[in-house]
Image: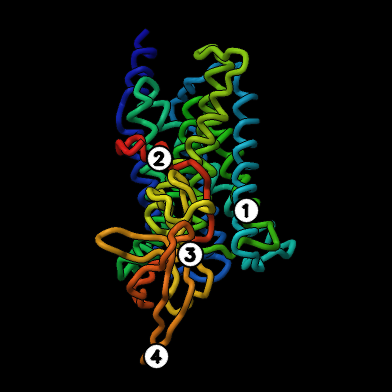
Amino acid sequence: MNRGKERLLGQQSPKYTVLVLLFLLLAFLLDNLVFGPRIHGFIGNYLLPALMWTLFIIFIAKLPAVRPAGKLRQRRLLRWLALMSVFIAILCTMLLGVIGGFGKSPYDHSFIGIIINIVSLGVALVAIEMTRAWLMNRHFSKRLLIGIPLISFLFTFFSLPLNQITNLNDRLAVVKFVGTNFLPGLGQNLLATYLAFLSGPVPGIIYRGGLTAFERLSPVLPNASWASQTLLNTLAPVLGLMLVWQIYREETGKVKVYKGQDDTLGWVLTSLAAIIVIWFSMGVFSYSPRVILSGSMQPGINIGDIVIIKEIDGSQAKLGDIIMFPLNNMKVTHRVIAIQERDGKKYFTTKGDANSEPERDPVSEKNVKGKVVMVIPKVGKFTMLMRGGG
């Protein structure tokens, strides 16, 4: 009886958690300040980190056991869902390559190089996922909405390269770092933490191991812009998380699925549309949407259509382009029908396709904000209704 009480007290003691967090902090500092920067070569870059994480695996395995919150019979399903999330990420990576082209991978693909990477990265990944599952299910098994964000932020922080953080010297560098490192990393950690909550470390090992294996073993990798990387590399784990959440709820009977209902697809499409609209509206891709409120460009562009505007240097506008420019405290999209050049600068005569006369004043090249590259019919009518213009 006394032994059972002692064991229970040991399981509830915070000393294990303190030790785990201290080891994570020590590993972060060693990885960023010692292994590589001060101890070079094979020993510093591969051997010592692998030994450190191996010791951590042994330490975590000796801690009081914790049980994941998910049902035992669903663990196989969760492993398959983790693998499906890897495939989603690979598809997004391939799409990045289609958008921006592919380049040769910088990683060593020799047989020895592959083995070294598998061992050194593999033990680190296993240690991290074991730690994630232990922390999540020990402290937050009943506080999911607190635990998943907290644990995800913790492991995202520990995964960020310290040298890159210290070299952020301007606003654009910070934005790029957040977009290409922090947001995708946070998305991956949110998914891995949810998997750890439901089924322990194995699905997270499958998910993050699959991502790492693809990145390290693929002979080519995308050369897309940082903005495209931000969008798709953040979208991939979000879609994976939604997939796991929805299918697990359906399989465990927490949500009923009726004939003709496809909640997962709907949420995926909604998420995709929301992210695309946000990023386009921010002008991150040098493209932005605009709802057409007048009929001056009919029949080609109608009221309620959305046009996609690409930012251009005004001097690049050509005869026949539909350009956007400010006019009387609003932005107008009209077609270029004539171009004059004075003092080395271009001036554009514009006219709405539905108008009988061109605009009286030519548009200087400095006032050209962009040109129309795509028309999406009728989609903007919802926005007009919300504004009371319908």
Label 4 sits on residue:
344
Crowd around label 3: few <14 · some 14–19 · many ≥20 (10 Å): many
**Hey, what amino acid is under mark 3?**
Ile
Q: CA distance from mark 3 to mark 4?
A: 22 Å
User: Which label sits on residue 95?
Assistant: 1
Crowd around label 1: few <14 · some 14–19 · many ≥20 (10 Å): some
Say which element carries label 1. helix
User: Which label sits on residue 152?
Assistant: 2
Q: CA distance from mark 1 to mark 4?
A: 41 Å
User: Which label sits on residue 322?
Assistant: 3
Q: CA distance from mark 2 to mark 1?
A: 26 Å
Residue situated in front as seen by the camera: 333 or 77: 333
Crowd around label 4: few <14 · some 14–19 · many ≥20 (10 Å): few
203 shown above or below 256? below
Q: Are marks 3 and 2 in contact (CB under 8 Å)?
A: no
> Of the residues tagged 1 and 4, which is closer to the observer?
4
Looking at the image, which residue sits at the far front? 356
**Hey, what amino acid is under mark 2?**
Ser
Q: Are marks 2 and 4 in contact (CB under 8 Å)?
A: no
Q: Is residue 123 visible?
A: yes
